[in-house]
Each structure stands twice: as C-alpha cells, then as structure tokens.
C-alpha cells in the first residue's frame, strides 16, 4: 500500500521513495547566487501533474519563510497530461481550471498565515509543464493532443492576480515561466534556471515524469525534446513506489525472471503484471532513445557529456544501479548522475530572488534553443526497438 505524506513521511525522497506518485518533493538544490533584495514576500509555485509545491520567500533576505504542498486535484480527470488534454476537450477545461486556481489561492493564504507579521505579497512565480500552464490559464489544450503537438497559444509571461485567480485578494503580478515547446514546458525552463549558476558548460537535464522531458546544454546551445514515458515510472500501483518499481524490475531481470524481451516467467514473484512490464519497457526505451538522439544531434557521446541532472521526485528517488540494469540509463553515465530535487521550484524561486540575472539567462536560453520532435526523427523507431530489450546495446 502506498503511503501518503501524512503517514510517517521522512521528507526525503532520496532516502525513501516509497510514496511513489504520492511523494511530494519540496526540496531543491538551492544556489548561492546573490539576492537582488527588495521589500515584501514572494511565492514560488511548481504546478506538477501529480503534485503542487509552493514556497514563500522573504524578498529582502532570500530566506524561505514557509512551504506548502498538495496533490493536484485535477487527478480526478486522469493521472497524466494526455488524459487531461482529452478531458479538457470534452468539456472539463473550466472545472480543471477552477480546481487548480482555487487550491493554489488557498495555498497562498496558507503560506501567508504561517507568518505572524501580516506579510505583503509582492509577486508570484509559477512554473509547470505546458499542459498544466494551459489549464491554469484556461487555454484550450486541443492542439497539444494532435500532431505536431504544439501549443496554439503563447501567452504573456505576466498577469494581474485577479486575471489568474478571479479575485482581488492580492494586487501582485503573477509571472508564468514560459515553455520551450509543446511537451517541454516551463518546468524545464525553470529547472535550467535553477541549475545554470553552478553548472558546467555542458550538461543534460532529465525530468522522469510522464513526459520524459530532456534538455541538453552545450556551451550556450540548448537542445530540448520530450518522450511519451507515461505514468509507468511513478509506481502508483506498486507498493515500492517510484524507486521500488525500477529496483524490483532490475532484480527480476538479474534473476532471469524477466527475459531480455520482457517476457515474465511463470515462476516470477507477483510483483508486476505482464502489461506493467511492457509499459515500463516502452517508457524506458522512449527515454533512452531520446537521450541518444539528443547526444547524436549534438555530436557528443557518453564520455564527452558532462553531468546528468535528474529532476523531480522520481529522479530524486531513483537508484542509478537499477536504472542501468533495466537499460533506462547507459552504464557509461552511472557516475555522472546527480539528483537536483525540485529544480522547477528552484527556478521559480530564482526568478523571485534574482530576477535580473535569471531573466538574462532565460533570454539566452530561448535565443539558443532548438527542439527535436522524436516522432519525426528518422532514427527514433530504430533506437526505440533496440532499447526495448533488457540487454541494451551501447550505441554512443
């Protein structure tokens, strides 16, 4: 049975991971960048498909004054972005917007109530994947559900509080972190902003959520892509949660209870159904194939690649040995993997606390970005078939 956060949560997904898709990751790798001090308080919001995490910051000191998190209530319309795109197209858009707007507004009041000095809210910065951002703003998601899966909207980055939340409780601006592409959202933009100040000139950022978003940064050039990983990694129906899914699968592969084609032996422990094994094969192959195409396009290989940053709760809980065993990650990258926690929240916080520097970096990223549409890439199908195996060849 999966635990909820209230049931003996230790608050560290890296050590635990047992909550699976119900784990709410509030920590991120905070930078040491100088705070551009100003008066008042600001709220950073990470709108995840599964969870929403919020933090209140003193804009003068940069200190985090309060935190709040909750499960995204839009889960009632499906666990992933595809199901919510479908629901929005069948009349649920207004209700999904209401659900997320009301709960974030309530979360903001919870953050402010944690202070006894009646703080003045000066700004809100919100980051999320492209679908979550569309639903927050009440924008049609229809174009995101059909090829070439691109957003039909490019909204302003800043709104009045009333325009987003429908009430005048506060008069502060609401900044929406912009997206790069249809399934490479503002959460990846924010993640890059969080990482850049302390990162080398070449690195890879991977968010192992339902979209499998990836961004390769190479000396000022940025290449992004996303894979249809689905909810397989989240482990919502698996007792071990996010980390336990890959750990148990790796054990079955090592013991021969799952063969190289993914066939589950009749004598295998009842840890997975055959369908769950297939779903994991599809997800891990999509991510691995996308990773390889990113590197090929950039003319890089595993040796020349810098650190591999894993963002989000799944990345934080991931056992790298298990990821290598099942072929999600190549063995050559094992010692390069770094968990960076909730980088999306960290990037939103950086836009609050060091807005001039963060916006300068964001401008450079958007000026240098190119997207790879894996569905149209001539190598994707070939690599996808190769990487389905649990004995994955090294191609780079």
Image: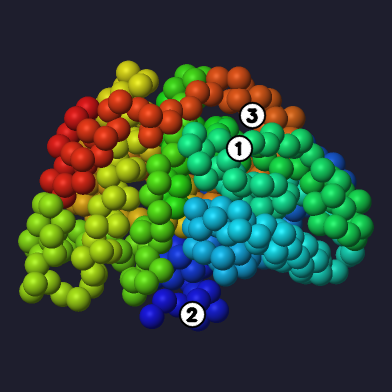
Q: Residues within 10 Å of mark 1 (few under 14, many from 20)?
A: many
Crowding around mark 3 (Cα neighbors within 10 Å: few <14, some 14 to 19, many 20+) is some
Residue at x 45% of width, y 47% of height: 211
| Residue 171 pos. (x, y %) | 91, 51
Taking the image as shown, residue 32 lies to the left or right of residue 168, namely: left
Query: Between 366 and 89, which is closer to the camera in this rendering?
Result: 89
- Residue matched to label 3: 362
Q: Residue 143: image x %, image y %?
A: 58, 41
The residue under the point 70% across, 30% down is 359
Please indicate, yes or no, whether residue 215 appears anywhere in the rendered image.
no
For the N terminus, give its image quadrant: bottom left
Q: Nearer the viewer, residue 177 or 381?
A: 381
Residue 151, label in figure? 1
Residue that mark 2 sits on: 8
> Which mark is on residue 103?
none
Tell me which residue sits at (29%, 50%) in the image. 282
Choose the circle earlier in sequence order: 3 or 1: 1
Nearer to us in this view, 147 or 19: 147
Above or below residue 291? Residue 71 is below
């Amino acid at each position: 049975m999966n635990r909820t956060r209230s049931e003996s949560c230790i608050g560290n997904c890296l050590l635990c991971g047992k909550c699976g898709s119900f784990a709410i990751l509030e920590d991120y790798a905070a930078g040491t960048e100088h705070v551009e001090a100003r008066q008042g308080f600001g709220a950073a919001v990470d709108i995840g498909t599964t969870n929403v995490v919020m933090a209140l910051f003193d804009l003068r000191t940069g200190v985090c004054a309060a935190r709040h998190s909750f499960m995204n209530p839009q889960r009632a319309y499906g666990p992933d972005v595809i199901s919510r795109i479908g629901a929005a197209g069948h009349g649920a858009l207004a209700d999904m917007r209401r659900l997320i707007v009301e709960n974030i507004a309530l979360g903001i009041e919870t953050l402010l109530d944690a202070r006894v000095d009646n703080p003045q809210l000066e700004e809100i910065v919100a980051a999320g994947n492209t679908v979550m951002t569309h639903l927050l703003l009440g924008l049609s998601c229809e174009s995101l559900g059909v090829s070439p899966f691109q957003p039909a909207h490019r909204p302003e980055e800043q709104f009045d509080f009333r325009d987003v939340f429908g009430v005048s409780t506060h008069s502060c601006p609401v900044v929406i972190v912009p997206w790069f592409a249809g399934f490479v959202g503002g959460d990846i933009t924010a993640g890059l902003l969080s990482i850049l100040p302390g990162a080398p000139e070449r690195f890879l950022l991977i968010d192992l959520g339902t979209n499998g978003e990836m961004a390769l940064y190479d000396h000022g050039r940025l290449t992004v892509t996303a894979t249809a990983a689905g909810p397989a990694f989240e482990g919502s129906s698996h007792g071990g949660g996010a980390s336990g899914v890959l750990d148990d699968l790796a054990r079955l592969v090592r013991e021969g209870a799952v063969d190289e084609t993914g066939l589950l032996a009749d004598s295998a422990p009842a840890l997975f159904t055959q369908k769950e094994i297939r779903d994991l094969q599809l997800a891990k192959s999509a991510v691995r194939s996308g990773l390889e195409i990113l590197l090929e396009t950039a003319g890089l290989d595993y040796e020349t690649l810098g650190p591999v940053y894993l963002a989000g709760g799944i990345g934080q809980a991931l056992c790298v040995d298990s990821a290598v065993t099942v072929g999600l990650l190549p063995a050559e990258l094992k010692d390069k993997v770094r968990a960076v926690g909730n980088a999306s929240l960290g990037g939103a916080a950086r836009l609050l606390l060091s807005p001039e520097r963060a916006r300068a970096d964001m401008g450079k990223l958007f000026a240098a970005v190119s997207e790879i549409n894996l569905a149209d890439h001539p190598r994707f199908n070939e690599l996808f078939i190769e990487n389905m195996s649990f004995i994955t060849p090294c191609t780079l």
